[in-house]
Image (tube, grey):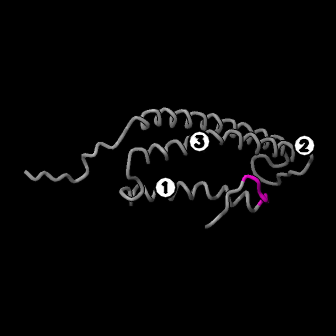
Amino acid sequence: MQITLDPGGPHSPAYTAEVAKAIPEAVRVLNHATLNHPGEALAFPADADTVIRAVATAAQRLPQLFGQLCSWLAEEDLSGRTALTYGEFSGEPAAAAATVRARLDDASAAAHALQSALTAAAAVTATISASGQGEQETSDG
């Protein structure tokens, strides 16, 4: 999968879905790289720090996204463009939208906690440097 990330668009439902699907794929790539190729994926403690800080930034941005999704769903409900024909909220789109809003509020709180924990971890990783002990040293008498 190759996508171009551009906040300026052009935006479409397909592009929005493509970008959203890239998030778990990016984590999968990082998992694979750091498990199967850690010596290639990370060379210095600063590399780990960079990853931690980038993921913290992603977590920090999630609550805004969740809020915008809630607002969009609420607007769709208010304008009568939603319907539920089966499931727990059958015939009750307003109740469904309220439940989604409550769950995304929970997700926002979790994202804040994740961002906070990662920022605290980065405060430590920022102080870690390579010792040079892993490098081969020669001592010729």
Give 38 or 67, whichever is nearer the viewer.
Answer: 38
- Mark 1: few, some, or many residues within 10 Å (few <14, many ≥20)? some
* Side of 124 relative to 93 (left or right): left
Reading the image, the residue beneath label 2 is: 78
Question: Which segment did they paint magenta?
Answer: 7-13
Give the foreground label among 1 and 2.
1
Instruction: Please provide percent x and percent y for residue 21.
Output: 64, 58
**Which residue is found at the position 62% from the left and 38% from the top?**
60
Instruction: Please provide percent x and percent y for residue 68.
Output: 77, 43
Amino acid of disc 3: Thr
Question: Of the residues under marks 2 and 3, which one precedes in the sequence?
Answer: 3
Amino acid of disc 2: Leu
**Which residue is found at the position 69% from the left and 36% from the top?**
105
Give the foreground label among 3 and 1.
3
Amino acid of disc 1: Leu
Magenta stretch contains residue 8: yes
Is the C-beta separation of discs 3 and 1 under 8 Å? no
State the image quarter where residue 97 is shown.
Answer: top right
Reading the image, the residue beneath label 1 is: 30
Q: Quadrant of the N terminus?
A: bottom right
State the image quarter where residue 33 is shown.
Answer: bottom left
Instruction: Please provide percent x and percent y for residue 127.
Output: 40, 34
Can you tell which mark lies on residue 57?
3
What is the distance, in whole Å, between disc 1 and disc 2 at their CAs?
41 Å
**Which residue is found at the position 85% from the left and 48% from the top?**
91
Residue lying farthest left? 141
* Side of 111 relative to 39 (left or right): right
Give 110 or 133, whichever is nearer the viewer.
Answer: 133
Magenta stretch contains residue 119: no
Q: Name the secondary structure under disc 1.
A: helix
Question: Of the residues under marks 1 and 2, which one precedes in the sequence?
Answer: 1
